[in-house]
């Protein structure tokens, strides 16, 4: 065994030893957890993955114990004992040692963030192809779901009077519409620009998820109306609440439904404060629309419901020769086909400023985007676009009329979605249904 491998082995054994101390020796638990945290962080990615597997083995229920317990339960049921009595006695025997370890960690200073970080590492590893760690991730997720239930979360508004470090924290974690300077955050905390976060008692100084809202007259057609104040309806009484950015600040809480809770809680608060609000919508990006969907289709990828011929069919009648003629002027040469023209046009962000191209591309792009959001699904039947999956899964709706052309003209918006954005509409029916699902 090479020296580096022996060193890795020593670290892994030490980590498991420290985990046992945390689980079994309360007086030494805090010190052991600190040491384990530092040692774990010193490991390379492959070392952390190896630790995940060893942790599962070290804190699993022994096979023979499990078999004996289950056989005894079957015998009791066959003798006619009540199911409730058998289940009640099974609980302590089937309780995973991992659960006990994680509960002990959560009770220690810094323990909850550590568990969220561990789950974030597990999720990242699974996305990278690591296998065999799903039971570990599920064990942490189950406890986090319990600890971050609706009743344990507090909704707070972030205002210009909020602590400077909190506003800076949000600015640094705004990933949907990033800000260059802290002053930009101030523009999003005005009278008709609101920001709310969900806070947990174990992490009272920072939100676990936050959302930015604009109160507007009607549904905005672009993000520039909101962020840059470029709204020709400014000054009119607001009748619409627009959720235009939602950010999870803790990767370890991904997929636990906190965004749904936040949207509901903010809707509830705004309905109480502004009786005149009649519509609750989003103004959402369409991440991946160009690089992971439309461009692959134009290059001949057949993994989608939409194909090259379907795209070309959107340019019927005079639209096809007009696009090729305009592309010849814009590109400096004449493409042979509509597919070739679109591939070259959308690789250049200045197409949006052309005098003719936007008018020719508006309707086809909206049609393609609507198909992408509503008819393209992953192998599990979920919308292929993750943002669509979140909002449609929450009960929102989308139509062609709520897909906005040239709504994000930033370089990032053009590169990600050809400048398109979408408004997902939340109805009164959705609000009542979510109240029921949350037990309110």
Image (cartoon, rainbow, N blue to C red):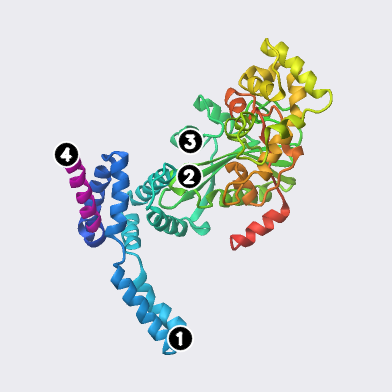
- Which residues, given as a range, are shown in magenta? 5-20
Residue 2 has which mark?
4
In front: label 2 or label 4: 4
The residues tagged by marks 3 and 4 sit, at their Cα atoms, a distance apart of 42 Å
| Residue 195 sits in quarter | top right
In front: label 4 or label 1: 4
Position of residue 37 measured from the top left corner of the image (x, y, whole percent): 27, 46
Mark found first going from the N terminus, 1 or 3: 1
Q: What element carries label 1?
A: loop
Q: Do the residues labelled 1 and 3 touch (CB within 8 Å)?
A: no
Q: Do the residues labelled 2 and 1 touch (CB within 8 Å)?
A: no
Kindly identify the residue that appears in the image at 22 percent across and 53 percent down. 18
The answer to whether residue 355 is visible is: no
In front: label 1 or label 3: 1
Front residue (pair 273, 187): 187
Kindly identify the residue that appears in the image at 63 percent across and 33 percent down. 297
Position of residue 355 measured from the top left corner of the image (x, y, whole percent): 75, 15
- Residue of label 2: 207
| Residue 373 sits in quarter | top right
The kind of secondary structure the magenta stretch mainly shows is: helix
Mark found first going from the N terminus, 4 or 1: 4
- Residue of label 1: 82
């Amino acid at each position: 065994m090479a020296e580096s491998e022996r060193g890795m082995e020593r670290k892994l054994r030490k980590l498991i030893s420290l985990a046992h101390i945390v689980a079994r020796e309360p007086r030494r638990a805090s010190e052991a957890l600190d040491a384990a945290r530092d040692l774990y962080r010193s490991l390379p990615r492959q070392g952390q993955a190896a630790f995940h597997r060893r942790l599962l083995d070290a804190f699993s229920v022994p096979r023979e114990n499990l078999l004996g317990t289950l056989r005894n339960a079957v015998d009791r049921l066959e003798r006619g004992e009540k199911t409730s009595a058998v289940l009640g006695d099974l609980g302590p025997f089937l309780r995973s040692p991992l659960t006990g370890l994680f509960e002990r960690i959560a009770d220690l200073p810094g323990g909850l963030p550590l568990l969220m970080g561990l789950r974030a590492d597990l999720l990242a590893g699974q996305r990278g192809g690591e296998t065999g760690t799903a039971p570990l991730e599920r064990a942490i997720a189950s406890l986090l779901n319990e600890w971050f239930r609706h009743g344990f979360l507090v909704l707070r508004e972030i205002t210009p009077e909020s602590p400077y470090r909190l506003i800076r924290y949000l600015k640094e974690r705004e990933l949907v519409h990033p800000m260059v300077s802290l002053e930009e955050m101030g523009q999003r905390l005005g009278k008709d620009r609101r920001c709310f976060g969900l806070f947990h008692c174990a992490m009272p100084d920072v939100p676990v998820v936050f959302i930015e809202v604009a109160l507007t007259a009607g549904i905005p057609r672009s993000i520039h109306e909101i962020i840059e104040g470029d709204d020709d309806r400014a000054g009119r009484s607001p009748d619409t609440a627009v959720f235009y950015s939602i950010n999870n600040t803790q990767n370890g809480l991904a997929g636990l439904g906190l965004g749904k809770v936040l949207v509901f809680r903010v809707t509830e608060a705004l309905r109480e404060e502004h009786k005149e609000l009649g519509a609750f919508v989003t103004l959402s990006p369409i991440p991946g629309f160009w690089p992971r969907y439309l461009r692959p289709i134009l290059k001949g990828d057949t993994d989608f419901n939409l194909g090259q011929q379907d795209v070309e069919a959107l340019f019927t009648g005079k639209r096809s020769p007009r696009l090729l003629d305009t592309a010849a002027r814009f590109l400096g040469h004449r493409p042979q086909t509509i597919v070739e023209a679109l591939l070259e046009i959308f690789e250049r962000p200045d197409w949006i400023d052309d005098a003719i191209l936007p008018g020719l591309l508006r309707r086809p792009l909206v049609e393609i985007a609507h198909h992408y959001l509503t008819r393209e699904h992953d192998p599990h039947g979920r919308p292929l676009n993750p943002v669509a999956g979140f909002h449609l899964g929450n009960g929102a709706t989308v139509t062609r009329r709520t897909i906005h052309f040239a709504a994000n003209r930033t370089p990032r918006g053009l590169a990600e979605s050809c400048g398109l954005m979408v408004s997902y509409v939340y109805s009164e029916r959705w609000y009542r249904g979510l109240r029921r699902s949350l037990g309110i």
